[in-house]
Amino acid sequence: MNNLFDNAKKYIAGGVNSPVRAFKSIGIDPIFIESAKGKYLKTSDGRELLDFCLSWGPMILGHAHPTVINAVTEALEKGTSFGAPTQAETKLAKIICDAFDSIDKIRFVSSGTEAVMSAIRLARGFTGKDKILKFDGCYHGHSDSLLVAAGSGVAGISKSTSLGVPEDIIKNTISIPFNDEKTFCETVEKNAKNIAAVIVEPVPGNMGVVLPEPGFLEMLRDITAKHGILIIFDEVITGFRLTFGGAQHIYKIQPDMTILGKIIGGGFPVGAFGGKKEIMDRLAPDGNVYQAGTL
Ligand SMILES: *Cc1c(COP(=O)(O)O)cnc(C)c1O
């Protein structure tokens, strides 16, 4: 086992392609996976393990589910990427639009990070404002604007959680505690004319699972609407997992935009962002907010 990790470290930075996989916080070397089926993993050192991770969410049907494998095999044989549209994309888009009342139109990308990044640009283009407001402990991928947390002690001063994020970018992200109505209202009151969007995991799943206080999400929806601020629900974890129509279905709230990822890809690199028609129509080629992708 050690050997595999040592060998990986020779060629891959840190031996892994995403930091948590290094198992640093639990003080052991990572396990390497040979194969998986249903709820079981087979490790490279010959153990069979019950999988509570499921690729961090996407494998909700279990590993190598026959329906998925058949569909993917059929698709592979027809070629994998064309740089031109296919009917399958429209079919998947319709399933997702039908599942979420708040989504009229969608755009597919390759990861949750990319979906969030694009949605933020669209929110800024749509509102003509620059700042975004997020909540401490919510994770929205690793784009510059979102690797920001509240600075220690000083209200309204943000700091980045990574080196390499310019001050000029950090200053446009405000991060405040989740479930804190008073801080939210005061922050919006002070910055309303500069805030393009509020982004939130409606049921945060990246700091343990934290339920929103009764009325908290409704309050976010009301206050943002009042100030011409878009509200973006990051449902990369909750979408198609909490229930078919996501957390917004359970809480009966319509966000302006929704982020999807993990589960909609079923183990393949797919993300998406969608929302109301008048917002989504501002994307290129119909509008002048640019977003694109080779794959
Ligand atoms: C995983 C996650 C992302 C990022 O998705 P990637 O596909 O890893 O880029 C964004 N938002 C939430 C809530 C997530 O859990």
Image (cartoon, rainbow, N blue to C red):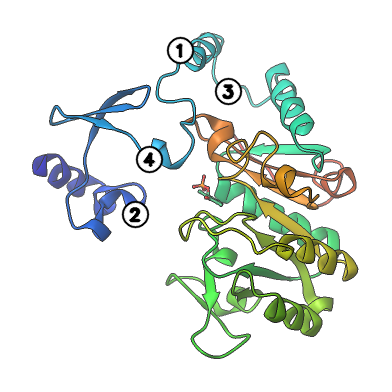
Q: CA distance from mark 4 to mark 2?
A: 15 Å
Dot 4 or dot 1, earlier in sequence: 4
Q: Which residue is mark 1?
A: 66
Q: Secondary structure at mark 3?
A: loop
Q: Amino acid at mark 3?
A: Ser
Quadrant of the frame with the C terminus: top right
- Residue 96 appears left or right of 114: right
- Crowd around label 4: few <14 · some 14–19 · many ≥20 (10 Å): few
Residue at left offset 46%, top offset 12%: 66
Q: Secondary structure at mark 2?
A: helix
Q: Which residue is mark 4?
A: 53
Residue at left offset 26%, top offset 52%: 23
Name the image quarter holding residue 190.
Answer: bottom right
Q: CA distance from mark 3 to mark 1?
A: 23 Å
Disc 4, disc 2: CB below 8 Å?
no
Name the image quarter holding residue 47.
Answer: top left
Q: CA distance from mark 3 to mark 4?
A: 29 Å
Q: Nearer the viewer, residue 178 or 28?
A: 178
Q: Amino acid at mark 4?
A: Cys
In this rendering, the label closer to the viewer, 4 or 2: 4
Does any portion of residue 258 appear in the rendered image? Answer: yes
Mark 2 C-beta to ligand 1 under 8 Å = no
Residue at the far front in the pictured view: 214
Disc 4, disc 1: CB below 8 Å?
no
Residue 19 circle label: 2
Q: Amino acid at mark 2?
A: Pro
- Residue 117 appears left or right of 251: left
Mark 1 C-beta to ligand 1 under 8 Å = no
In this rendering, the label closer to the viewer, 3 or 4: 4
Dot 1 or dot 2, earlier in sequence: 2
**Compared with residue 87, is residue 107 higher up or lower down, i.e. above or below?**
below
Q: Which residue is mark 3?
A: 81
